[in-house]
Structures are given as C-alpha cells and as structure tokens.
Amino acid sequence: MGEVRHRVADLEAKYGGNMDDIPDRFAEGQIDREAFEDYVDWMGMVHALRAYSEGEDFDYFTEDILELSKDEISKLTPRRLELMDQISRHRADSINELATTINRDVKNVYNDLKTLESLGFVRLVKEGRRLVPDLLVKEITFLTW
C-alpha cells in the first residue's frame, strides 16, 4: 500500500498537484495519451486508498511485466500452477487446509508455496501460528519469443 501512496504522490507532483482537469484537457487535445493513462491509474489508486481508509479491503491491481529466466519459468510446474489456481478460487485459512483441499502433502505444498513466494506470485501471511497463502497475481500470461 505504501508503494501505491508513493505512486499517487509522484503523479500529483508530475502534474502540479491537480489531476482533476486532465480528462477535459485530453478531450481538447491539450495533453497526450500517456498523461490520460496516468490519470486513469491515479484515479484507481485514489479510489482504492479511499475505500481502504473507510474500512474496505485494499483492492488495487496493476499490470506488470515480469521477465523470468528459463530457470525461473521451469519452477512454474503444473503442481505450482494448480496451487495458484486453487488459492484464486478458495481462500485457504492455512497451508494445511490448502494441502487437504488438493490432496497433497503439507510439506510439499509448503515448499511449492515458498518457491512461488520467491518468484513474487504468492505471499505467506502469518496469522497467529498459521501461515496463510495470499495470491499476489490475478492473471498470468506467458509470452514466448
């Protein structure tokens, strides 16, 4: 969330603190598409931060291009992709619950989650004595050259 606040401040500084007139200026041809796209990003971040301050979950997604090496791509095994799919469909309250749901050994699931965490796809959040898997991606697209 701190990263989002920092990005909002950067965009506001870039455009002199006032982003509200950007849609009108874009419609009049006074600014380019990049500035309008910045405005759209800014609005999404501001709305997410406002909702969070009012007690809702922080819900803001960005599209990132992550370049993985062949070694890193090879770590995205079918079992690990299945884990991410399962987490996206059902929030598990623990690694044990996740392992039970997909009929796998808890230790193997834990190791796979640690690998996915190292790649930036999953975060393991400590809740009491439990580690709860949290998916950090909504969609993955593989591009090959």
Image (spheres, rainbow, N blue to C red):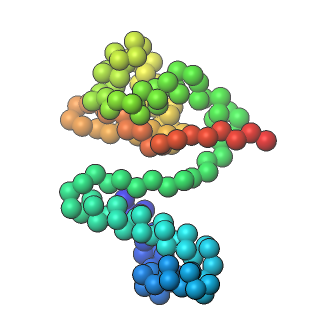
Q: Residue furthest front?
A: 27
Image quarter in which the C terminus is found: top right
Q: In front: 86, or 113?
A: 86
Which residue: 47% across, 31% down?
84
Q: Is residue 13 visible to the viewer in this orientation of the structure?
A: no
Along the line of sight, the residue nearer the viewer: 62 or 109:
62
> What is the tally of numbered marks visible in this picture?
0
* x 27%, y 59%: residue: 52
Going by the image, does 113 lie left or right of 74?
A: left
Identify which residue is drawn at 54% across, 85% down: 25
Q: Look at the picture and state if 56 lies above or below 133.
A: below
Question: Residue 42 lies in what quarter of the image?
Answer: bottom left
**Looking at the picture, how far across and down is residue 74, in whole percent?**
65, 29
Residue 104 visible from this viewpoint: yes
State the image coordinates of residue 11 (x, y, percent, origin top left). 48, 76
Answer above or below: position of 5 versus 65.
Answer: below
As drawn, 67 above or below 94 = below
Q: Quadrant of residue 20?
A: bottom left
- Residue 1 image offset from top left, x and y in percent: 37, 59
User: Residue placed at 58% from the left, 86% from the top?
Assistant: 28
Residue 87 rendering spot, x and y as whole percentages:
40, 31
- Judge by depth and name the residue closer to the eye, 40 or 70: 40
